[in-house]
Amino acid sequence: MVFPIVFMPDAQNDLMEIYDWYASKSEGLGERFIKSFDKRINLISVTPEISPIRYENVRCSLVPDFPYLIHYEAALEIERIIVYRVFHTSRRPLWED
């Protein structure tokens, strides 16, 4: 089963900021990030429990080739994947705030 992905507003903002930052650094790098992100999110949509739970019910999955973690919940009871944030790995984790 492929679970639909729901992006919370913070995650959408994170993605736009990350894309803009990479696009400003090198031509095509923003697109490379998005392709890598899309590959990971597609994997999550078919195997939502692939990543470990890091805090409460939130799982974290690393974007390949980039230092970003996708913070998501596999809400299988409602058949959805909820993406809360996309954080750089050096940022303070949500569960420490």
Image (cartoon, rainbow, N blue to C red):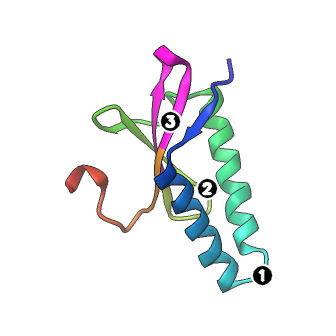
Q: Nearer the viewer, mark 2 or mark 3?
A: 3
Name the residue at 65% across, 85% down. 25
Magenta-drawn segment = 70-83
CA neighbours of label 2 inside 10 A, class few (<14), some (14 to 19), many (20+)? some
Residue found at the far left of this picture: 96
Q: Is residue 3 above or below residue 89?
A: above
Q: Position of residue 8 (x, y in %)?
A: 50, 45
Q: Main secondary structure of the magenta part?
A: strand
Q: What kind of residue is marked 3?
A: Ile
The disc at residue 35 is: none
Residue found at the far bottom of this picture: 25
31 sits to left or right of 15: right
Report which residue position mark 3 lands on. 82
Report which residue position mark 2 lands on. 64
Q: Nearer the viewer, mark 3 or mark 1?
A: 3
Q: Earlier in the sequence, mark 1 or mark 2?
A: 1
Q: Position of residue 5 (x, y in %)?
A: 61, 35
| Label 2 SS | loop
Q: Quadrant of residue 92?
A: bottom left
Q: CA distance from mark 1 to mark 2?
A: 19 Å
Q: Nearer the viewer, mark 1 or mark 2?
A: 1
Q: Quadrant of the N terminus?
A: top right
Report the label total: 3
Q: Is residue 31 above or below residue 44?
A: below
Residue found at the far right of this picture: 28
